[in-house]
Image (cartoon, rainbow, N blue to C red):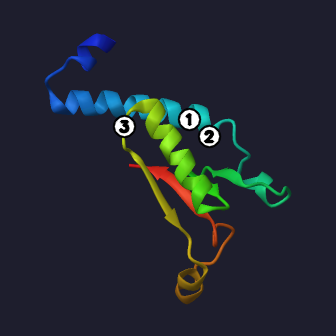
Amino acid sequence: MTISDYIYSTDKQERKDYEDHIFQNVWWAFTAQLPKEEDWAYNSVDVWYYEDADEILCRTEELCEMIANILEAITGERMAQTGYYDPVEDERDGSTDGRTGWYYVTYD
């Protein structure tokens, strides 16, 4: 199939597969430019990419939402999801780690 076949396809699954592909390509291009997990501990950064969980981590909620909005504006898709690694919850669950206290962007 060509790109125009996907764009004009009436098959909802084909259309979704194409949109997912576009979002993933933008995601990979974006995250390739970010510091990686091993870099964040040594640098004072506001954004870094955690490859194991495929998440962009941000120091502030505003920055997190801005990145999600940028990704969605570029792709035209609402696939980005945001959240927060709450220190209180992580402490209670015994799951504190380097992501605790950071906001995150991921995609579905």
Q: Are marks 1 and 2 in contact (CB under 8 Å)?
A: yes
Q: Where in the figure is residue 96, as x and y percent of width and height?
A: 63, 78
Disc assigned to residue 37: none
Q: Mark 2: which secondary structure?
A: helix
64, 94: nearer the viewer = 64
Q: Which residue is mark 1?
A: 28
Q: Is residue 102 left or right of residue 37?
A: left
Q: Which residue is mark 2?
A: 31
Q: Amino acid at mark 3?
A: Glu
Q: Judge the density around disc 1: few (<14), some (14-19), many (≥20) Cα neighbours within 10 Å.
A: few
Which is closer to the viewer, label 2 or label 3? 3
Q: Residue at x 65, y 36 (%)?
A: 32
Q: Which residue is mark 3?
A: 77
Q: Mark 1: which secondary structure?
A: helix
- Kindly report the distance in space between the C-alpha atoms of the residues bearing marks 1 and 3: 15 Å
**Residue 107 versus residue 5 in the image, above or below:** below
Q: Are marks 2 and 3 in contact (CB under 8 Å)?
A: no
Q: Where in the figure is residue 4, as x and y percent of width and height?
A: 28, 11
